[in-house]
Image (cartoon, rainbow, N blue to C red):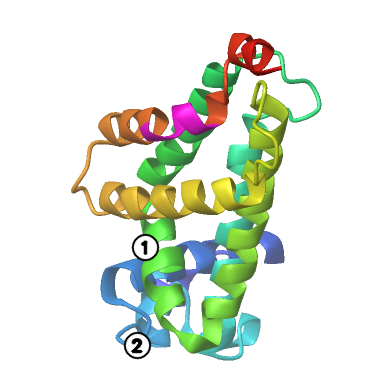
């Protein structure tokens, strides 16, 4: 327990604290989670926790920064925007499945990011900035992967719609209300027509 903690490198200890904090925040909510509870979950002393993070606000902000970065990098890792060898539907499927399976494997992280942080004025800007990074990634994916897009297609707004729908469905996955594979299939089917664009033979007939 706290009195018998081993000496660990600072970076390792920080991650241990953040892991404990995310778990406790996801279980009890921001306001109902105390620094004492986080210290106990991390098996460290409360003074040590405050030595690393001077307040609960600072600790929650560190959790948000880490979880947003992890989420974006995990999804980005499955997509190569510079070398799109997959056909568009496979690309869409890869992206959405990576998104949904990350949420399913990191439910506590998603609950903290999108159920607690978004409801707090103090942290909502951080979440909005993270969401914009995701939207930008998806917009570039849509632009690169869409065949024969109609003139004036607004890929940014398409990305906003897709990310919004994804967040709503992902929240149900994170709470166990929806099966991750069923949720991914639903989002893929809803999105595919927009990503596909107009068939090339229709373009030829229209010209």
Residue 140 lies left or right of residue 121; in this view the side is right
Quadrant location of the N terminus in the rendered image:
bottom left
Tell me if residue 90 comes above or below residue 5 in the rendering: above
Q: Secondary structure at mark 1?
A: helix
Visible residue check, residue 111:
yes
On the image, which quarter does residue 25 sit in?
bottom left
Residue 200 lies left or right of residue 161; in this view the side is right
| Residue drawn at x 64%, y 26% as measured from the top left | 146
Label 1 or label 2, whichever lies nearer to me, is 1
Q: Secondary structure at mark 2?
A: loop
Q: Which mark is residue 132?
A: none
Q: Which mark is residue 31?
A: 2
Residue 21 lies left or right of residue 64; in this view the side is left
**Which of the two residues, 36 or 4, is positioned nearer the viewer here?**
36
Q: Which mark is residue 111?
A: 1
**Which of the two residues, 13 or 192, is positioned nearer the viewer here?**
192
* Picture coordinates of residue 181, whole percent (x, y): 30, 29
Visible residue check, residue 71:
no
- Marks 1 and 2 sit apart, C-alpha to C-alpha, by 14 Å
Tell me if residue 134 comes above or below residue 46 in the rendering: above
Q: Give the number of marks.
A: 2
| Residue drawn at x 52%, y 19% as measured from the top left | 89
| Residue drawn at x 35%, y 71% as measured from the top left | 24
| Residue drawn at x 39%, y 42% as measured from the top left | 105
* Picture coordinates of residue 65, whole percent (x, y): 62, 67
Would you say residue 102 sits in the magenta stretch? no
Residue at the limit of the structure toward the right, as seen here: 82
Tell me if residue 92 comes above or below residue 63 in the rendering: above
Per the rendered image, the range of residues in magenta is 190-194
**Which of the two residues, 33 or 14, is positioned nearer the viewer here?**
33
Q: Considering only order in the chain, which callout, 2 or 1, is on the residue closer to the N terminus?
A: 2
The overriding secondary structure of the stretch rendered in magenta is helix
């Amino acid at each position: 327990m706290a009195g018998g903690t081993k000496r660990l490198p600072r970076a390792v200890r920080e991650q241990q604290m953040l892991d404990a904090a995310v778990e406790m925040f996801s279980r009890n909510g921001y306001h109902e989670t105390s620094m004492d509870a986080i210290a106990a979950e991390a098996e460290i002393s409360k003074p040590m926790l405050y030595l690393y993070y001077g307040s609960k606000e600072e600790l929650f902000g560190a959790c948000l920064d880490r979880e947003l970065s992890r989420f974006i990098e995990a999804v980005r890792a499955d997509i190569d925007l510079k070398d799109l060898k997959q056909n568009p539907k496979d690309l869409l499927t890869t992206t959405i499945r990576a998104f949904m399976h990350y949420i399913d494997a990191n439910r506590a992280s998603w609950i903290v990011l999108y159920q607690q942080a978004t409801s707090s004025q103090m942290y909502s800007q951080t979440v909005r900035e993270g969401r914009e990074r995701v939207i930008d990634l998806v917009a570039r994916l849509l632009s690169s992967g869409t065949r024969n897009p109609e003139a004036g297609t607004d890929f940014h707004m398409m990305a906003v719609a897709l990310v919004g729908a994804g967040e709503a469905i992902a929240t149900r996955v994170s709470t166990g209300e929806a099966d991750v594979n069923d949720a991914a299939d639903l989002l893929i089917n809803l999105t595919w027509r927009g990503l596909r664009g107009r068939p090339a033979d229709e373009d030829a007939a229209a010209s």
